[in-house]
Amino acid sequence: MLRTTMLAAARSSAVRRLVEANPLTRTVVDRFVAGADTSAAIGVTGRLAEKGLHVTLDHLGEDTTDSRQADETVLAYQGLLAELRRAGLAHRAEVSVKLSAVGQQLGPDGEKIALDNARRICESAAEAGTTVTLDMEDHTTTDTTLRTLSDLRVDFPQVGAVLQAYLHRTEQDCRELAREGSRVRLCKGAYSEPASVAFQDKHEVDRSYVRCLRALMEGQGYPMVATHDPRMVRIASELAGSAGRAKDSYEFQMLYGIRPAEQQRMAEDGERLRVYVPYGQEWYGYFMRRLAERPANIGFFLRSLLTR
Ligand code: FDA
């Protein structure tokens, strides 16, 4: 119920104005978002890399409504990738891209516009010596995103994508994508989805996550286990062990600001741990989805609104 309300608020411009207008919001946002610009993103990446962590950077923005905005997003990624290279951090950091931020929703040509724009980002990533992972948005975009992935992989075989265990279809998608050379980031899923396409019960989502993990670990690709759930982390390690995987043939991923001590501990234990680091001005949708995931985050948010 709370989750549904928060996810509806994530799409409401009235709530957005209210949240953004509060001067204390920024303090809380800073826990989950690296900063407003490229230099803040590079700074955080450098600090995480020094601690032995890997990074994926997300230039915040989604639901782009005109091609100029989509173009600006591409330029932002290109600038970021050039800076990563200059700072000697490209071996530690890749980028995550939402296709809706580069034009996927721009009418009947949206898919092609997003593909062309994503291709420009992939070219810059290749020049910098790193790669791209496509984020996954709501279920209406899954087919388009997977088609775009397959088109991009012709020229950029390292491009990866996110799959969401809450969707009924995902176990099958995992089997199809668990091929040699593919990179799949498996998460539970963060959007409000109908029962016709997604498991609604948390335990069912967890069971699906384990089935998907098994398919990925037993397959030939590179699984990226994106979760903060200690149980899923343990099961992923067990499945990797029973599939005979070496430590460098899969990785764990967590979001910036969530369980940072555990991120550090896992890296020190010899796991490859990648932190998903969002940055930029358009933090609202991302931030509200994080609050929706966990009542404790909402408590943290409300407390900081009440106290200085
Ligand atoms: P879940 O929320 O079910 O929590 C399970 C347990 O994890 C909790 O009981 C607690 O023990 C621990 N935990 C969770 N949050 C915690 C916190 N804040 N503090 C302490 N403990 C906590 N979604 C999507 O739809 N599309 C996408 O492209 C992506 N991309 C993505 C990338 C990466 C790297 C990650 C980690 C996640 C995503 N997501 C995503 C978000 C994802 O779908 C999901 O909403 C969140 O990761 C929360 O789910 P968890 O698996 O962490 O567990």
Image (spheres, rainbow, N blue to C red):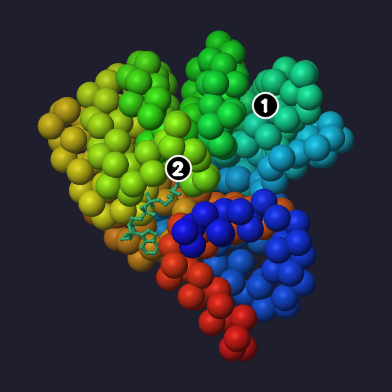
The disc, 1 or 2, on the residue closer to the chain's N-terminal end is 1
Q: Quadrant of residue 30?
A: bottom right
Task: Residue lying at the far right in this picture: please name it.
Answer: 68
**SS under mark 1:** helix
Please indicate whether residue 200 sits to the left or right of residue 87 in the image: left
Please indicate whether residue 214 sits to the left or right of residue 20 in the image: left
Residue topped by disc 1: 118
Q: Quadrant of residue 74?
A: top right
Q: Position of residue 53 (x, y in %)?
A: 42, 52
Q: Which mark is residue 243?
A: none
Q: Nearer the viewer, residue 71 or 142?
A: 142
Examine the rendered structure and indicate whether residue 248 appears above or below residue 308.
above
Camera-nearest label, 1 or 2: 2
- Three-letter code, disc 1: Ala
Q: Residue at x 76, y 61 (%)?
A: 14
Q: Position of residue 222 (x, y in %)?
A: 35, 28
Q: Residue at x 39, y 22 (%)?
A: 173
The alpha-carbon separation of the residues under discs 1 and 2 comes to 22 Å
- Three-letter code, disc 2: Gly
Q: Nearer the viewer, residue 45 or 111?
A: 111
Q: Nearer the viewer, residue 206 or 33?
A: 206
User: How many numbered discs, if any?
Assistant: 2
Residue topped by disc 2: 189
